[in-house]
Image (spheres, helix red, strand yellow):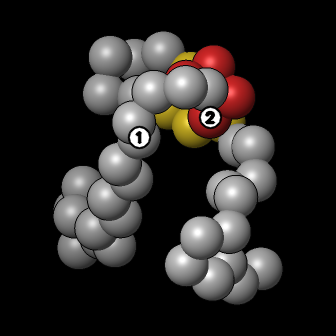
Amino acid sequence: MKLEIGDQAPDFEMDSHLETRVRLSQLYGQNVVLAFFPKAWTPV
């Protein structure tokens, strides 16, 4: 799925750095920045 600038992000859940699960909808009303670094935390 490709998003365009200004599109609303779909709700999803992922692991946080605090060893908990976080759902995007839990952060509604807050500023959220997502950064993806492929292979950054892998032993490759």
Q: Quadrant of the C terminus?
A: bottom left
Q: Is residue 37 above or below residue 24?
A: below
Rendered residue at 71%/43% (across/down): 12
Q: Could you tell me residue 38's position as x and y percent?
A: 34, 73
Could you tell me which secondary element the residue under label 1 belongs to?
loop
First of labels 2, 1 by sequence position? 2
- Dot 2 and dot 1 residues touching (CB under 8 Å): yes
Of 28 and 34, which appears nearest the observer? 28
Inspect the image, locate mark 2, and give the three-letter code of the amino acid beneath it. Leu
How many discs mark residues in the rendered view?
2
Label 2: how many Cα within 10 Å (few below 14, some 14–19, many 20+): few
Rendered residue at 31%/27% (across/down): 17
Could you tell me which secondary element the residue under label 2 belongs to?
helix
Label 1: how many Cα within 10 Å (few below 14, some 14–19, many 20+): few
Q: Could you tell me residue 16's position as x and y percent?
A: 41, 28
Q: Is residue 9 left or right of residue 18?
A: right
Q: Is residue 23 left or right of residue 44?
A: right
Quadrant in the rendering for residue 24: top right
Q: Could you tell me residue 25's position as x and y percent?
A: 69, 28
Q: Is residue 22 visible?
A: no
Residue 43 is tagged as none
Of 35 and 15, which appears nearest the observer? 35
Q: Is residue 44 visible?
A: yes
Inspect the image, locate mark 1, and give the three-letter code of the amino acid beneath it. Val
Q: Is residue 1 above or below residue 19?
A: below
Rendered residue at 35%/48% (across/down): 33
Rendered residue at 41%/40% (across/down): 32
Which residue lies under the disc numbered 1? 32
Q: Quadrant of the N terminus?
A: bottom right
Give me the C-alpha separation between circle 2 and circle 1: 9 Å
Which residue lies under the disc numbered 2? 24
Q: Is residue 16 above or below residue 36?
A: above
